[in-house]
């Protein structure tokens, strides 16, 4: 593992929200980025910390991300309301194609 702390935070959030068995299935079989965002936002961590974990996860290499974004991409944040700092969703904007929404991004823990 390249970033064991981030993986531990993700695993703990999934276990807290979905239980051990379902969290294990989600990590092995894959889950959408939207489902992960929901789990992190439902966990007791602060919104800004949850969003930082997602950014770390996407660049860590510890998760297999589908589709492949390529080497140059950035995140687009969606906020609760205008001028709010409470992030409720994330999309990825790769250099070579349009915006990929969180429901279209799949994550699976690399073995």
Image (cartoon, helix red, strand yellow):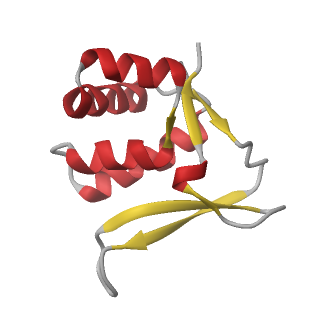
**Image spot of residue 46 (x, y percent):** 21, 53
Residue at 59% across / 20% down in the picture?
110
Q: What is the residue that sits farthest to the bottom in this orientation?
A: 82
Residue 68, quarter of the rendered image: top right
Q: With 54 as the anchor, is 41 left or right in this view?
A: left
Residue 84, quarter of the rendered image: bottom left
**Image spot of residue 33 (x, y percent):** 49, 45
Name the foreground residue: 60 vs 84: 84
Residue 47, quarter of the rendered image: bottom left
Q: Relative to 109, does residue 77 appear above or below in the rendering? A: below
Residue at 64% across / 37% down in the picture?
65
Q: Relative to 22, does residue 67 appear above or below in the rendering? A: below
Q: How many marks?
A: 0
Residue at 44% across / 50% down in the picture?
34
Q: With 85 as the anchor, is 69 left or right in this view?
A: right
Q: What is the residue that sits farthest to the left in this orientation?
A: 44
Name the foreground residue: 59 vs 99: 99
Q: With 38 as the anchor, is 68 left or right in this view?
A: right
**Image spot of residue 81 (x, y percent):** 30, 82
Name the foreground residue: 37 vs 72: 37
**Image spot of residue 106 (x, y percent):** 58, 39
Q: Quadrant of the C terminus?
A: top right
Residue at 79% across / 63% down in the picture?
95
Q: With 25 as the anchor, is 65 left or right in this view?
A: right
Q: What is the residue that sits farthest to the right in this orientation?
A: 96
């Amino acid at each position: 593992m390249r970033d064991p702390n981030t993986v531990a935070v993700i695993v703990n959030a999934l276990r807290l929200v979905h239980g051990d068995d379902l969290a294990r299935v989600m990590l092995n079989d894959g889950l959408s980025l939207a489902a992960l965002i929901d789990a992190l936002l439902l966990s007791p961590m602060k919104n800004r910390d949850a969003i930082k974990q997602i950014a770390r996860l996407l660049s860590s290499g510890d998760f297999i991300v589908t589709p492949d974004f390529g080497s140059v991409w950035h995140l687009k944040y969606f906020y609760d309301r205008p001028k709010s700092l409470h992030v409720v969703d994330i999309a990825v904007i790769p250099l070579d194609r349009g915006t990929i929404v969180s429901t279209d991004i799949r994550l699976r823990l690399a073995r």
